Amino acid sequence: MDALASGTAPIDYQSLRFDYRRHPDQDAASPVRHPVVVVGAGPVGLALAIDLAQRRIPVVLLDNDCTLSTGSRAICFAKRTLEVFDRLGCAERMVAKGVSWHVGKVFFRDEQVYRFDLLPETGHERPAFINLQQYYVEGYLSERAAELPLIDLRWNNKVIGVEQAADHALLTIETPEGNYQLAGEYVAACDGSRSNMRQLLGQEAKGRVFRDRFLIADVTMDADLPTERRFWFDPPFHPRQSVLLHKQADGMWRVDFQLGWDADPVEERKHENIIPRVRALLDSIGHEKVQFQIGWASVYTFACQRMEHFRHGRVLFAGDSAHGVSPFGARGANSGVQDADNLAWKLAAVVQREAPDALLDSYASEREYAADENIRNSTRATDFITPKSEVSRLFRDAVLDLSKRHAFARALVNSGRLSVPTTLQGSPLNTADVDVFAGPMVPGAPAADAPIVCAHGGAGWLLRELCPASSSEAATRFTAVVFGEGEAAERSLQALAQADAPLHIVRVAATGEGELATQRYDARPGTVYLLRPDQHVCARWRNPTPEAVRAARDRALAKA
């Protein structure tokens, strides 16, 4: 990690090579035991390790390679993911480097049928999406990890064996200097779609494989195009197929061409075959004179599938190792980071003996529910984009044609329902409402951001006040958001104090800067929202009692 920690700039993250270093664990007489071992140093594994370290949990992070991502790969990072990265201390750089966007346009043949806005309202700190190459995201996360002494990142350490015991998992690890073993009280498998950990445990991901091929090309060009997502169905420059275009950092553009199942992956990846496709696209949108260069390219197929269970004893699966979706909707990396967000606080609570082991079962059930939602949306998008029969194609084209003039048809158009955080309805950690509320901030929902006046008197943002990245103490606590002033608010504050539970208190004024937050949470003076450490609502009241607060917190820690 020295190259990252040194702060030298600029860094070519794609060419970085990290040194293998022998660790004292390799010379121990018996396997050394660690609280948590994370396998896989991609975006999900890095996010999980950082989150745990900020909660004062030592982490061993193993990676079977010595490099970061090659090629842009995952590029669309959603607002909720950026809010998680804010708490991890690295979102600012990502937003500054990435391309922020919120508008998408859908075309049918050579005509725009409609546009959509993913964040039409104001009052959010973070954009709906940024486009940023995965190697930048991994690089920034790696630099953040290098700042945290509780993260022990070991490159060229490949897990080749797993044995489970009642209170730990024993890993056999292959290195350039031979094998060694270490034990983890808990092991998080974040090692990607071809998960070696999944295979070692004899597990598999089941679902639907799509018989189609797509070409991804990273194209560097100085094109004067708006920073918006453009999606074409059956365009004249690529008939009977689909094309996706959007901008990344460094003047790079991502282009996806649907190819069909019979396409030759080797031939289609050749630059001499990509160039005419890109030229035809640019010519069709009036950029005949734009020059471009092809960088990284890949031809891929995909599947929508998941493991039946994300928890297997002391091993918990997260990210692509647990579930996979098509790229339409940017649900892969975003859902993986939200897996890490869900798992970190629960692992910390269990390791610190603040919650029973059963809390980790809720990680599996909540994120399996989220995976099903993502797979459902991803499958529907893929079926619409790639009709597999003439009848399906006729239906799709009729919907697209109608959508030019009729709003009802636009609701049926699916060029990829873009990633949104899952509301964890039915979670065993939720406390049911006893009061009447309106709006989407139900138990299980991720907290919505809004401008507020901070405790120090300056303007700020609600989500930053919930769990400040600079405060490890606050990051391990539940948060109670108290709305309004006056007698009702004071009674609620007194009830929270009498609950005798460690809570981080955030006050939100009902007027001025707090007005929008009050609207979004359907709050009145004295209203209290109890938020988990991952910023999901777990309970809410108009007038809480100490007993209700204690019971809700215990329930959210699986103590009830």
Image: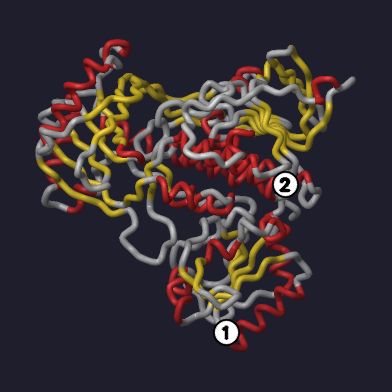
Residue at image location 76% in from the left, 46% down from the top: 350
Q: Residue furthest right?
A: 29
Q: Nearer the viewer, residue 450 or 291?
A: 291
- From the viewer's perspective, tell me whether residue 244 is left or right of residue 463: left
Query: On screen, 89 above or below 60?
Result: below
Instruction: Using the image, tell me which numbered label, if any, was put on residue 485.
Output: 1
Q: Secondary structure at mark 1?
A: loop
- From the viewer's perspective, tell me whether residue 104 is left or right of residue 186: left
Q: Position of residue 281 (x, y in %)?
A: 16, 31
Q: Position of residue 312 (x, y in %)?
A: 68, 30
Q: Position of residue 520 (x, y in %)?
A: 44, 68
Residue at image location 62% in from the left, 60% down from the top: 431
Work out how far the residue at label 2 is from the one at label 1, CA to CA, in angstroms. Answer: 34 Å
Give, as a three-letter code, the residue at label 1: Glu
What residue is pinned by disc 2?
Answer: 348
Residue at image location 45% in from the left, 81% down from the top: 512
Question: Is residue 164 something that shows in the picture?
Answer: no
What quarter of the picture does the N terminus occupy?
Answer: top right
Q: Nearer the viewer, residue 404 or 124?
A: 124
Question: Is residue 265 something that shows in the picture?
Answer: yes
- From the viewer's perspective, tell me whether residue 373 is left or right of residue 227: right
- The image quarter containing residue 480 is bottom right
- From the viewer's perspective, tell me whether residue 451 is left or right of residue 286: right
Give, as a three-letter code, the residue at label 2: Ala
Earlier along the polypeptide chain: callout 2 or callout 1? 2
Residue at image location 23% in from the left, 38% down from the top: 222
Query: On screen, 533 above or below 258?
Result: below
What quarter of the picture does the C terminus occupy?
Answer: bottom right
Q: Nearer the viewer, residue 166 or 88?
A: 88
